[in-house]
Amino acid sequence: MEIPSTFNEELFVDYVVQNSDKETTINVLSQHIGEYQNYSTRQPMITEFEYKAHQFCAENGTASGADLNLIWTNLSKEYGGDSIEFYDEDSVEWAYVNHIYLTNNYYTFNYAVSKAITLSLFKQYREDPETFNKNYIAYLSACTTIPPEEKLKKYFGIEINRQLFEDAMDVVELRIQELNELEAEMSANDSYSAAKNLNTSGFFWIGESKNK
């Protein structure tokens, strides 16, 4: 269900890159790359948090807020690495994530998988639009008559494996390259810095433009 909408988002970004002015394109790419981070790291982290919380409860019978804060803190530092500054107040962030149900459904990892599929499909689209369009229409037309994993393999040769995520990362690298090239061009003119616009949390983004 998530794939058609996120694929349309990728098409929109591609349209912006090809048809908009540099500043608009930089702003859109900056936000979009931040969303890649949200899909590929934050959503799996939320799922792992739920899993570890259930493990903790199974071993200890219950879990306090402080226990859950510690689990979230450790995961945030692991996923963020040294590139992300972590504040003590962030430890309770798990309580604000409305996709955390703590009901053994581990819901959010599906976002990461669906985004990887979207980007893998987009890579095929860029390589051969005409063939892709025919397959994509057939893929959508099949609706629920075929299980999702079988549809992906039948129409696109895609399987849920390591190659899927490697193909997805090729598109991420493409977007980063596009952003870097545009940022360099803008910086030469007016010291515009797209890097400051990147949103590492994946939730909010604020664009800034500095002109001499």
Image (tube, rainbow, N blue to C red):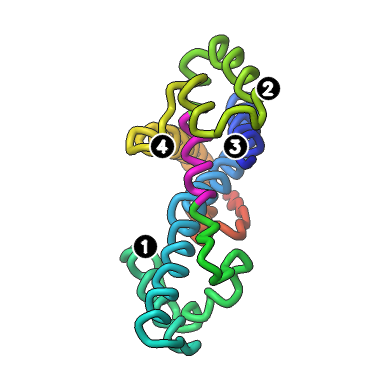
Question: Which residue appears at 50% of the width and 82% of the height?
Answer: 89
Asked if the residue under mark 2 is in contact with the one under mark 4, i.e. CB atoms within 8 Å, the reply is: no
* Above or below 169: residue 127: above
Using the numbered discs, state the Cα–Cα distance from disc 3 to disc 1 in whole angstroms. 25 Å
Residue type of the residue flagged with mark 1: Tyr
Q: Tell which of 18 and 53 is nearer to you.
A: 53
**Lower sequence index among marks 4 and 2:** 2
Mark 1, residue position: 79
Mark 4, residue position: 160
Q: Nearer the viewer, mark 3 or mark 2?
A: 2
**Lower sequence index among marks 4 and 1:** 1
Crowd band around label 3 with a 10 angstrom C-alpha radius: few (<14), some (14–19), many (20+): some
Crowd band around label 1 with a 10 angstrom C-alpha radius: few (<14), some (14–19), many (20+): some
Q: Which residues are magenta?
A: 110-120
Mark 2, residue position: 141
Where on the picture, by quarter, is residue 146? top right
Residue 193 percent location from the top left of the image: 50, 49
